[in-house]
Image (tube, rainbow, N blue to C red):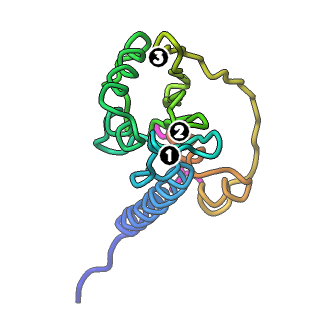
Amino acid sequence: MSPRPSKTWKAVLGWAVLSAGVWAATAWWLTHEVTADLPPVQSTLRAPSREQAAPSRESIPDRIGKGDTLSDVLGRNGFTASEIHEVAQALSAILDVRRLRAGNEIEIDYDDTGRARAVRLDRQDLNRIQVTRSDLGWQSESEEIELSTEVVSLSGTLNGNLFSSMSALGESAPLTIAFARVFAWDFDFYTQSR
């Protein structure tokens, strides 16, 4: 007859199973929530050709995908090699185009003749950059996105586990993870919350 597992061993095993489940659920939620907000990469969408006149002004959203460069994005949206070079030169006054990352959003405005007239970049560092075609060539400008800070308090009772308690209060998984990380060295939410 084999010996029965101790209570400590059961607690450790229960904690491991619960932790794995919570992290798997959080990872699933984050990948589906975060990627749901991003627009799809427009790999087959083309700008109107120079020969075809577009009926009206058009704005085409795109974003830098994994492994993409600015040249790739502009090229698939109808820019010629010389236009790509001119846009990159105008941007180099503000930022290093090699520092653009996957997920950076790009929006291209076309005039009623199908000619690109502006390129807007929304970077993840809360900076919006616009390059506009003028009689002097492409001109760039940068604008910081203003943030406002709002202090909010939240209170509740821990029932069951931290994730279900925070969800019952209407809070998201990323906030729960951040909360748990802040107190990770001071409080064990699995054992000390009982």
Q: Secondary structure at mark 2?
A: loop
**The image quarter in which residue 96 lies:** top left
Tell me the CA gap for discs 3 and 2. 17 Å
Q: Secondary structure at mark 1?
A: loop
Tell me the CA gap for discs 2 and 1. 7 Å
Task: Check if mark 3's residue and mark 1's residue have beta carbons within 8 Å.
Answer: no
- Residue lying at the far left in this picture: please name it: 1
Task: Check if mark 2's residue and mark 1's residue have beta carbons within 8 Å.
Answer: yes
- Please rate how many residues cluster around mark 3, counting C-alpha atoms within 10 Å: few if below 14, some from 14 to 19, many from 20: many
The residue under the point 41% across, 17% down is 91
The residue under the point 59% across, 17% down is 143
Q: Where is mark 3, residue-wise? A: 138
Q: Where is mark 1, residue-wise? A: 52
Tell me the CA gap for discs 3 and 1. 23 Å
Q: Where is mark 2, residue-wise? A: 114
Amino acid type at image mark 3: Trp
- Please rate how many residues cluster around mark 1, counting C-alpha atoms within 10 Å: few if below 14, some from 14 to 19, many from 20: few
Task: Work out whether 155 lies above or below 99.
Answer: below
